[in-house]
Image: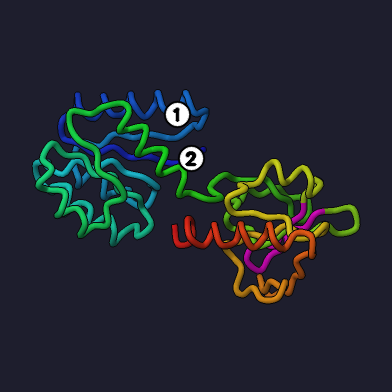
Amino acid sequence: MVGMKIGICDDEKDVAFQLKAYVEKYQTEKKCACEIEVFSSGEELLLCAQEYAVVFLDIEMDGLDGIKTGELLRRKNPDIIIIMATGRQERYKEAFRIQAFRFITKPFEEEEIYEALDAVSDCQCGEEEIELFSKRAAIRVKQREICYIRACYGDTEFLVGDQVFRKEISLNDLENVLDQKMFVRVHRQYIVNMGWIETYQDGRISIGGQCITVARRKRKEFERKYIEYDIQYRGN
């Protein structure tokens, strides 16, 4: 959740800032600095909908209510994670239309907020950025954008889309930096991003236009992690 932008939308100012305090306490305890913004209406939130990864959205608001706001959010930002807040459980069914990720009830309880944020963290892969270099120019990319990483003649190459970047770091050190839910070492020369694997068969991975062989001693571990990734994180 590091660097993630979180929106809180509720037309009751005191309630919104109470929720913000819970989120701030969570990120302090978890050591995950996020940017948090409070909005007092659905209309206000929709002006910058594409900027946010997660939004806490009150169902009952004046003007655009939470359900209508959620529908419009989905059109503008299909990947946004919506956590619905309400004091009326009978309205939960409506929130399924907007693919709400979780529900929290009013009045808020710290434990329930923490559980919702833990669930968000568990389903997110590769959101942290890493600094790479191209012709000595530094650029920051999200880890999930990296297809695979290759050790090459004392240097390390990163395939990002159709571009190759470099960084002076060993694969051993990278294993401690990268999101282990998404990246796996398959060979002494390669680390792959399981989210970019096109096919896998008989110890061979097709990824980013490259065929990479999984070392025999790593196949069992790789296959276990790949199945786990496919079940828990694919499409998140």
| Range covered by the magenta-colored residues | 156-166
Name the amino acid type tagged 2: Met
Which residue is under mark 1? 27
Residue 157 on the magenta segment: yes
Marking on residue 145: none
- Residue 216 at x, y percent in the picture: 79, 65
Is the C-beta separation of discs 1 and 2 under 8 Å? yes
Mark 2, other Cα within 10 Å: few <14 / some 14–19 / many ≥20: many
Q: Which sits in the foreground, 2 or 85?
A: 85
Looking at the image, which residue is at 16% across and 39% down?
86
Q: Residue furthest right?
A: 153
Type of secondary structure dominating the magenta stretch: strand
Residue 61 on the magenta segment: no
In this view, 107 is above or below 94: above
Looking at the image, which residue is at 69% across and 65% down?
163
Which residue is under mark 2? 1
How far apart are labels 1 and 2 at the CA level? 9 Å
Mark 1, other Cα within 10 Å: few <14 / some 14–19 / many ≥20: some
Q: Total marks drawn?
A: 2
Indicate left or right for 34 with 54 as reference.
right
